[in-house]
Amino acid sequence: MAGRGDLGWLTARPIAHRGLHGLAPGVVENCPRAFEAAIAGRYAIECDVQPTADGDAVVFHDGTLDRLTQAGGRVDALPAAALKALAFKTTGDRMITLSELFALVAGRVPLVVEIKSEFDGKLGLTRTVAALAAAYAGPVALMSFDPGPIAWLKENAPGLVRGIVAESHYAGAHWARLPAAMRTDLAALGHMERTDPDFLSWRVADLPSVATERYRGSLQRPVICWTVRTDDERVIAARHADQVTFEGYLA
């Protein structure tokens, strides 16, 4: 486990969004070949974790299986063994658990793990991820859009590097399920006392941001940004963030 302290390792190299995927046939997001490609390029790796029915953490972005696999339904309805056996639509890779990802990376590049959440107060996944990260010898940071898991980490695993994923507007259907007041509070980092994040991961389209400029200036803590895909976004990121989370090109 990398301690909090100096976070130079977090910003030293560009961060491959869900691994280095989409540049070669059969290399899809959050799968072993995407992670291996990122390691070969010496990129840090961003990934997502979802809970399984039996309390494990699987590396997968969506809460449902339909977009990427030949199955359907919720990820958390199946145990880890069943999820690992599912066929993906466009790759021979299979889903892996977070512990398997840790074994694959083995400290060769930094890992940035997003704890997925439905803002429902459930913390089982956070506890699982924290226990695995505490036993991992390589550089790893944990983050979430939801302040709940990050506040839990502050109180229960203060030695782990923790961050908040955020944006300035929380607009669109995906965020409509949250009360407007909550979305305003998230954009303003109203949870800072509860979470005390070591870094922010901000939406590049929402830079520059008053919140991130104050965070970088007053706290001298890093801001990484997501998800950089174009030359224009690279310019914005260079001016207003300390590192990029990128996809679709070689950084």
Image (tube, grey):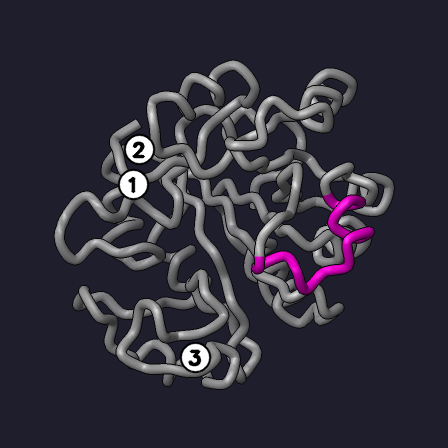
**Residue identifier under label 3:** 80
What mark, if any, has residue 42 been given in the picture?
A: 2
- Observer-nearest of 102 and 32: 32
Q: Is residue 25 left or right of residue 98?
A: left
Query: Eyeballing the image, is 14 above or below 167?
Result: above
The answer to whether residue 161 of the structure is visible from this angle is no
- Considering only order in the chain, which callout, 1 or 3, is on the residue closer to the N terminus? 1
Query: Eyeballing the image, is 85 above or below 150?
Result: below
Q: Residue at (56%, 46%) from the top-left corner? A: 1
Where does residue 242 sit, x and y in percent of width and height? 53, 22
Q: Is residue 107 left or right of residue 90?
A: right
Task: State which quarter of the image contains the C terminus.
Answer: top left
What mark, if any, has residue 91 been given in the picture?
A: none
Where does residue 105 sit, x and y in percent of width and height? 36, 49
Q: Is residue 170 left or right of residue 182?
A: left
The region drawn magenta spans 173-186
Query: Eyeballing the image, is 232 above or below 35?
Result: above
User: Label 3 to label 1, Cα distance in Å?
Assistant: 25 Å
Q: Residue at (46%, 84%) from the top-left corner? A: 79
Q: Residue at (50%, 26%) from the top-left corner? A: 11
Where does residue 95 sit, x and y in percent of width and height? 33, 69
Query: Eyeballing the image, is 186 above or below 179?
Result: above
**Residue identifier under label 1:** 39
What amino acid does circle 2 point to?
Answer: Arg
What amino acid does circle 1 point to?
Answer: Ile
Check contact, mark 1 vs mark 2: CB within 8 A.
Answer: yes
| Secondary element type, mark 2 | loop
Check residue 178 for magenta coloring.
yes
